[in-house]
Amino acid sequence: MARREDTPALRILQRVNLPLALWTVALVAYGTLMVSSATSGMAGGAGMFRRHLIGILIGLIPLVLFWALDYKVLQHWTGPLGALMLVLLTAVLLPGFGVMVNGQRNWLGIGSLRLFQPSEPAKLLLIVILATVIARYKGKIEKPSEVAHILAYLAVPLALIMLEPDLGTVLVFVVITAGMLLVGGLKPRWFAVFALVAVILVAGVWQTGILKTYQKDRLAVFIDPSVDPKGAGYNLAQSKIAIGSGGLTGKGLGSGTQSSLNFIPERHTDFIFAVLGEELGFLGAIVLLGLYLALLITALEISASSRDLYGALIAAGLISMWLFQVLVNMGMTIGIMPVTGIPLPFMSFGGSFMVTNLAGVGMLLSVWSRRYGT
């Protein structure tokens, strides 16, 4: 008879980071609850909620696959994965493949049928590719040629995403790269150089007309919310009203007036936090922040316990992605960040987004379960 410690179920359990699984399940459940509430009064809301559930179920597939796969194997697939990323980001720009949504050609589809957003899986592909490249420098990146070599892997996908144009995803890509370079051993002086270059680029982009009118309006409203209260500033104003009216405990699930009366645009996606703030109040927001903090701390522990720099870099990329998206999304709903269209991880409606986040959890599980080299 096999001993208890040798049973397959126990061996599987030992390869699961229970805190990571717990925080992920809690966030997905919390998000499902809020998406259900946000879509309940919308036209076609029942169908949206079903698609949200389907997105979660589909997301479990890459989660399990990445967990079962030794993450070190991904190093040998850098070329094909890079080619796949470029094909996806290029295809969305081609007539007949890309679908225009809210002024951006960032959906891959057939005709008007939307399939998925290539920029979402591209985030994970970028993390895998950069982890491979940065790990080769063994924690010491100093020379300009080394920095240029790494940034070259960012430049092409960044240019393709700018053509959509999707400024929010561009920022996510940049932050992912910065976080991985920090863990990868880039000297601090380089970050000062990057900050200076970023200021110059922002000024140049503003002057050259690359930004669309609505993107400039969003930035103008961020600087001065009173500029266009009935236009570009409307979303922000309604979001702040919703969150402010929630008080300590909120108005109750499904009882938010700003949400149910359709005052909050995109309330099931970009402004899901406004719905939560109105319906569940300050306490509901604190619970969500606590879950995110627990998830990020667990991910940091996984990064620190990795058996090699490559695994630590993968974890660092995921941490950077999630942290930035949480800060920007919550910040834009209360007016301390410009509106960029960045959704809230595990909370916002969106199949591509949910699948990407759950796949990221699978990658973290792979790094953690093989921390001793097994």
Image: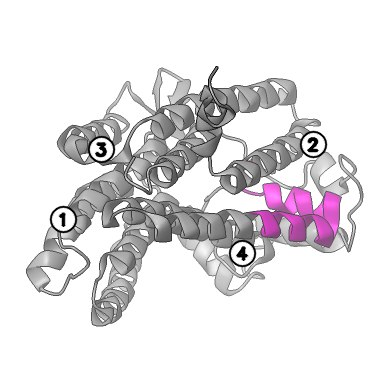
Q: Which residue is mark 1?
A: 152
Amino acid at circle 2: Ser
Residue 37, label in figure? 2
Near-viewer residue (172 or 179): 179
Q: Which residue is mark 3?
A: 74
- Pair 1/3: label in front: 3
Query: In the rendered structure, which disc, 2 or 4, sits on the residue that comes first in sequence?
Result: 2
Amino acid at circle 4: Gly
Check contact, mark 4 vs mark 1: CB within 8 A. Answer: no
Q: Which residue is mark 4?
A: 331
- Pair 4/3: label in front: 3
Amino acid at circle 1: Ala
> Can the viewer see residue 94?
yes
Check the image and report above or below for 296 versus 187: above
Q: Position of residue 360 (x, y in %)?
A: 45, 41
Q: Is residue 147 magenta?
A: no
Q: Position of residue 152 (x, y in %)?
A: 16, 55
Q: Residues within 10 Å of mark 1 (few under 14, many from 20)?
A: few
Q: Report the span colored magenta.
A: 268-291
Query: In the rendered structure, which disc, 4 or 1, sits on the residue that comes first in sequence?
Result: 1
Q: CA distance from mark 1 to mark 3?
A: 20 Å
Q: Residue at x 64, y 25 (%)?
A: 53
Q: Position of residue 311 (x, y in %)?
A: 33, 51
Q: CA distance from mark 2 to mark 4?
A: 22 Å
The residue tagged with tag 3: helix, strand or loop?
helix
Check the image and report above or below for 368 versus 213: above
